Amino acid sequence: MLRIHDYKGFPNPARIRIAIQEKGLHDRVSFVAVDVPAGEHKGAAFLARNPAGAVPVLELDDGTHIAECTAITEFLDHLTGEPVLTGGTARDRAIIHMMQRRAEAGLLDAVATYFHHATPGLGPHIETYQCREWGEKSRERAVAGMRYLDQVVGQQPYIAGNRFTMADITTFAGLLFADFAKIDLPADLVHLKAWRVRVSERPSISSL
Amino acid sequence: MLRIHDYKGFPNPARIRIAIQEKGLHDRVSFVAVDVPAGEHKGAAFLARNPAGAVPVLELDDGTHIAECTAITEFLDHLTGEPVLTGGTARDRAIIHMMQRRAEAGLLDAVATYFHHATPGLGPHIETYQCREWGEKSRERAVAGMRYLDQVVGQQPYIAGNRFTMADITTFAGLLFADFAKIDLPADLVHLKAWRVRVSERPSISSL
């Protein structure tokens, strides 16, 4: 049995919960709740699992811990069946990883930086260092990231082409985090809005 | 023939040049020089190849452009032979991607942020926005990243285990960038220093 240490409802945990449903692995996974609002992810016990102090973390049967959502997704995608989330051919893998990284750096991580640096974030007991200027700049970066992704899905149905992949999951989680951080999706980004409605109908996402 | 648009000697281009040598693909690749010091990577022609305005970019025969070093490495690693840089099994892939990401976020990107925000970087015509405070903080983050990676290679020969992988390439490029940005490797990080000497002897790196 695989164990996922996470906190339900948060954006990065959502990435892995979506991947598990897409791969049909829900019967092989159990969840262990980490009390993120109380700062449990910054405590010694959790830091031994992931020195970066972030959820989610995948724990394998042999005690190995896997952090970083792209790494956990690679694991799940190669565990069973064909890799559908990360691509089969060299070209598909390259495009999916490129678009995943753009969605991550340009949207999800930018939103996270705004949230943790320019808002109260998870509270003063967790946000022990904040750089407000970089946080505010990152809000601008997040909106620019939305604008780029809107262009992408104006030209193709999904973030990395014609199929739903890891890059869509990262984008969805980025918009989820943006809602939470109160960064509105600009009204003129009609393609990204339509994409969001469409992917939200997938069972992996509607069941979140 | 594959085309790599890059600037020789810079850290991210080095990641892909090392991967090409490790995979024995040098006969299938040609290089196109991008004048990064002159800001060519921020001009319209290059931004059409990579909207992030960064080298390297891989151009395929069909005109597809692949940016982001992890994505290019995935392509090269799956193009020919067994994937040796990104791993074969689900578990190997997960560990390699996790350690790659830690080396990237904790070292290479942290050094880059210091360089572009808290030093003159590539000059005022390119560094049009700088957040000095975040740049200085990122220098601290980079040194913390070195310290973490030193612990890792104190316990195993390579960053992701017993073999040289993409995670070692990212770490090597991070230290290369740190030299360039004048962030010294702390003297007590003896494991990371020994690792660096060892990987520097690989033909893919000594021929850079």
Image (spheres, coloured by chain):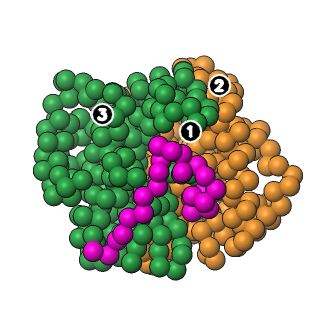
Chain colours: A orange, B green
Q: Position of residue B71 (x, y in %)?
A: 45, 62
Report the mark closest to the observer, 3 or 2: 3
Of all chains, the one bearing label 2 is A
Residue B140: image x %, image y %?
40, 24
Check if mark 3 and mark 2 are on a common chain. no
Quadrant where the N terminus of chain B sits is bottom left
Query: Which residue shows up at 42% across the image and 58% down it?
Result: B33
Is A4 left, or right, of A156 in this rendering? left
B38 part of magenta stretch: yes
Q: Which residue is mark 3?
A: B179
Secondary structure at numbered mark 2: helix
Kind of residue indicated by mark 2 = Glu
Measure the alpha-carbon separation of dots 2 and 1. Answer: 20 Å
Magenta residues, as a range?
B27-51
Mark 3 surroundings within 10 Å by alpha-carbon count, few (fewer than 14), some (14 through 19), many (20 or more) = few
Mark sitting on residue A133: 2
Q: What amino acid type is highlighted by mark number 1?
A: Ile
Any mark on residue A11, and which? none
Is B67 left, or right, of A149 in this rendering?
A: left
